[in-house]
Amino acid sequence: MSERRNGMQRFGGRIANFDYVKMWGRNAKVLVATEILFAVFMSWVELYKAIFMRSLGFNEIFIGFVLMLPLIPQIFLPVLGGYLADRFGRKSVLMSFDSVGWIGSAAVWVVVREPAHAIAAALLQGLSTTIYGVWETLLVEDTQPEHRASIYSTLQTLYVFSGLLTPGAGALVSLYGVELGSRYIFLAYLLALIAMFAARQVLLRESKIGKLLSSKESEKSGVGYAEVLKAIAKHKKLLIVFILTTIGGMQYQLSAVFKPLYLSDPRALALDEGIISVVPMASSIPTLMALFFVVPKLGLSRIRKALLFCYACGVLGLLTLVLAPKGSLALAVVSAILDSARYLAVYCILRTLLVNTIDEASELLRAKVMSLVIAFPALVSWPMPLVGG
């Protein structure tokens, strides 16, 4: 425990010159370095996808249906992905499903005009859920536990930095209108994905554990999900962190689906479609400060208090958004700033705690545990977008 805490403190001391990156495994370096191509344009796509569909004349019920579709395969495909990753190796499974799912989905969104096109794009995106847990497994394997906090902090820094660039999407929408501006966003996203996957295909390597489990001589990949669930249940700390991570993932999915529509809908806040890009940008600033100056110094003894504080801020942020009067951009920004703490808790603090706790049980379980963390939130929340619509 003290070794991990000291590792996080050392990370804080080296953050200015990025020496901590030298402590990462090769795959962590490759995945984090190329993720910026995904993060920047994905934030643009998620912000304007629902608004784009509304501009095509699709009603809220259909929009909710389309946004629900990727959650249905997310119930079972990550479970399949965990098995395939242990059986055939992390890299091959990751590249196969990830590239087809994301590139195919982005290509269809560029040309969407009919409801059937939107459904096809959503189903292709759902295919990529097969590797959500596999991606995160490859991210941390071959890196020592005491250095994984810096991986998650840097990764989330990239996503938060991407939020600062969302006004670029707003500028395209303001300049070309919602429909054409959104198509330009989807096209830029498609080109970025092609570049990212090309780089990963060349630079990624199979992890040591992946080689062990996928080798013909190994019988360890035969561990089924029933045994994995039993192992989680027996390990009290892993069970608690697993439950918290699952709940956090479910909350984020639900809030991310309808927030852009709520901000711009005439019956809700009624903000201009071009100006709502300021909201994620505003939330990025305090999150960046926390990632640089708070999280690296966060010892394990303070994690519980940090999580409670982050979730309290998240609840307050959601209440602020719901109670904000029509046209109140200022309160929408305040809400986003407060809610950014919840995002920090789920995708940085809890994620680091989870992958390190898995090692305490058995590192051979990682791919399947991470796949379950992806599948369980979808199992609970998949009908919510349709109900919300």
Image (cartoon, rainbow, N blue to C red):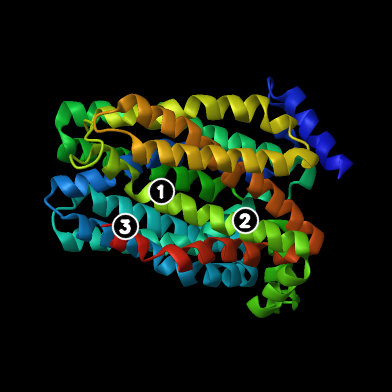
Element at label 3: helix
Residue 274 seen in the current view = yes
Residue 168 found in image quarter: top left
Residue 153, position in %: x, y? 63, 36
Q: Earlier in the sequence, mark 2 or mark 1?
A: 2
- Name the amino acid, label 2: Leu
Residue 221 found in image quarter: bottom right
Mark 2, residue position: 244
Q: Residue at x 82, y 41 (%)?
A: 4
Q: Is residue 253 above or below residue 270?
A: below
Check if mark 3's residue and mark 2's residue have beta carbons within 8 Å: no
- Name the amino acid, label 1: Ser
- Quadrant of image for the C terminus: bottom left
Q: Is residue 252 above or below residue 264?
A: below
Residue 211 found in image quarter: bottom right
Neighbour tally class for label 1: few under 14, some 14-19, many 20 plus, Cα within 10 Å? few
Look at discs 3 and 1 and give the one toward the viewer.
1
Q: Earlier in the sequence, mark 3 or mark 1?
A: 3
Left or right: residue 45 versus residue 62 is right
Along the line of sight, the residue nearer the viewer: 315 or 175? 315
Q: Which mark is residue 67?
A: 3
Along the line of sight, the residue nearer the viewer: 21 or 146? 146
Identify the residue at the far right of this view: 2
Q: Residue at x 36, y 61 (%)?
A: 384
- Name the amino acid, label 3: Leu
Q: Residue at x 30, y 57 (%)?
A: 388
Look at discs 3 and 2 and give the one toward the viewer.
2
Q: Compute the Cα span from label 3 to label 1.
A: 12 Å
Mark 1, residue position: 255
Q: Is residue 331 above or below residue 88?
A: above
Neighbour tally class for label 3: few under 14, some 14-19, many 20 plus, Cα within 10 Å? many
